[in-house]
Amino acid sequence: SVATPTSAHFSIARDLLALGKHLLIEKPITEKTSDARDLAQVAAEKRLVLQVGHVERFNPVLSALEQRLTHPRFIEAHRLSPYPNRSTEIGVVLDLMIHDLEIILHLVDSTVENIDAVGVPVLSRGEDIANARLRFASGCIANVTSSRISPESMRKIRVFQEDAYLSLDYQGQSGEIYRRVNGQITREPVAIEKEEPLRQQLASFVDCALTGGEPRVSGSHAAAALELAVEITRRIASS
């Protein structure tokens, strides 16, 4: 497992892959998208598992959402936390928002065509609060907000599609689904079997290492999320 400051991820991971080691590497996978794709290529060539620690992908909330997902038209994600004592060398987009970016790329499975982004530094050199609005080729819109200067923690996602609206809480591992039935709006709780995402992530990595399976969040998946996060950061810096 590679859980060092992001700036050291590439060199350490490269050396461990060269030694033939399967890797679970913390997110973001690297600082540079090119380095992330290099690691993914090396892992593929050596037939090694390269899994990246986007732990929210192992939250049972996401499994419940995937079971009910049809054609998402609008997605809204909020990820808020108090000011941290770590990871302040990177902004909130690479620290927190990247979780939601990776999830949204997975759910929508379409090319991002347009990005509008804003963010401001408050207590750090990088942005501490940020918002990005993404438009996909499929027509889906995603509005993503992240903050690390919030008095309270929040990790929620809402998905609107033609037949339903889902409101889900990663933190509480709970949710509701709204539908129109016989002309009436119904609200039902979403059945979610609570699990510890970190435990599931580690178990999945071990299983992939033993069986040669494809990790849920591969180096290529993480590189795509990093590329989007870096572009959002660039647009914030130039605004």
Image (cartoon, grey):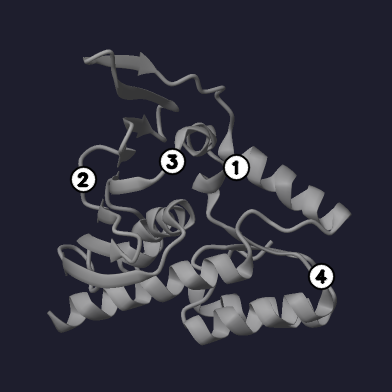
Image coordinates of residue 57 in percent, x first then y, are 53, 47
Pointer 1 residue? 198
Which quarter of the image is occupied by the C terminus?
bottom left
Which quarter of the image is occupied by the N terminus?
bottom right
Q: In which quadrant of the rendered view does residue 121 lie? A: bottom left
* Front position in the image: 90 or 64: 64
Proximity of marks 4 and 3: CB atoms separated by less than 8 Å: no
Proximity of marks 4 and 2: CB atoms separated by less than 8 Å: no
Q: Examine the rendering and report whether any part of residue 16 can be seen.
A: no
Pointer 2 residue? 150
Q: Which comes before the other along the chain, label 2 or label 3?
A: 3
Amino acid identity at mark 1: Leu
Q: Which comes before the other along the chain, label 4 or label 2?
A: 4
* Alpha carbon distance from label 4 to label 3: 38 Å
Q: Mark on residue 21?
A: 4
Local crowd size for mark 3, using a 10 Å CA cut-off: few (<14), some (14–19), many (≥20): some
* Front position in the image: 12 or 115: 115
Local crowd size for mark 1, using a 10 Å CA cut-off: few (<14), some (14–19), many (≥20): some
Amino acid identity at mark 3: Thr
- Looking at the image, which residue is at 50% across and 39% down? 66
- Label 1 or label 3, whichever lies nearer to me, is 3
Above-or-below relation of 127 to 86: below
